Image (cartoon, rainbow, N blue to C red):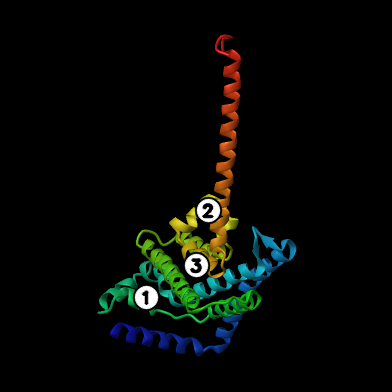
Amino acid sequence: MNALRLYLQYAAVSLRAQMLYPSSFLIGMAANFASTIVIFFGIWALFARFHNVHGWRFAEVAFFYGVINVVFAIADAATRGFEVFGPQFVKTGNFDRLLLRPRATSLQLAGYELRLQPLGRLIQGAIVFAVAIALLRPHWGLEEFFLLAWTATGGVALFFGVLILQATLSFWTVESLEIANTISYGGVEAGQYPLDIYSAWFRRFLLFVVPIGCVSYLPLSALLGRANMRIARRLARRRRSLHEHRQLASGHAANNCRSTKGRMPPFVK
């Protein structure tokens, strides 16, 4: 409880410091909003031309886009300390100051700065999410809303963990941490679309190596009612493949019987 109170005090100090320069805050938030809305316009242009991608419509992809951007904006706002841990703490030696304080270093890094600039991405993602809901008009009950909230919580935890991993790598190197950005920012770009559109090896990567699909594709496709359709398509493909294999096997058997019959002696016939 004391740790939570201290974190809230850290956050309050950070917010007050940022609001001392309201122009900088508004410009940064507007720039963040504009940079993300351009990406969404690209998605809109794609569906305006092709109407659907692997059977997924624009409203469904907008649903994915809105959720993943809101989730990442929350994680990005709260993990600034872990993001700059290498260059500003390990490289400069300021990490020793954190070790001398009678508080957990993870708590101090989490409270280092609560950024307001990702608010632009959060607002933009929320707007796209609202548009997607208006287009889809889903009939959800309490279970679906609980699944959506749990999905958002899991997504925040996943991106939080990725940035903590980036901070951990700073003990070995502080110059090549951009690889973590390929997982965090690259994961956001990949999670904005259903995994059905990717190759099989990349789907496995996003499910079992960096499990972004577990906090985006799997629960969100269930909310959209596409999980059963996906399973049905997979079963249909397997059934079709089995039927073709049986036909091929029966054809080979018939050919073998005819060739064997042609070689049999007359008295056997």
Residue of label 3? 219
Q: In the rendered image, which quarter contains the C terminus?
A: top right
Task: Tell me how far mark 3 sits from mark 2, CA to CA.
Answer: 18 Å
For the point 53% across and 88% down, which residue is it? 21
Counting residues from the start of the chain, the first of labels 3 and 2 encountered is 2
Residue type at mark 1 is: Leu
Determine the secondary structure under disc 1. helix
Amino acid bearing label 2: Phe
Quadrant in which residue 97 is drawn: bottom left
**Location of residue 169 with respect to 137 vertically, above or below:** above
Q: Secondary structure at mark 3?
A: helix
Task: Give the side of residue 146 with respect to residue 54, left or right.
Answer: left
- Mark with earlier residue (3, 1): 1
Q: Residue at point 61% right, 21% down?
A: 258
Q: Is residue 84 visible?
A: no
Contact flag, marks 2 and 1 (Cβ < 8 Å): no
In the image, 119 versus 241, the foreground residue is 241
Q: Position of residue 130 (x, y in %)?
A: 61, 79
Instruction: Look at mark 2 in the image and give the residue it sits on.
Output: 202
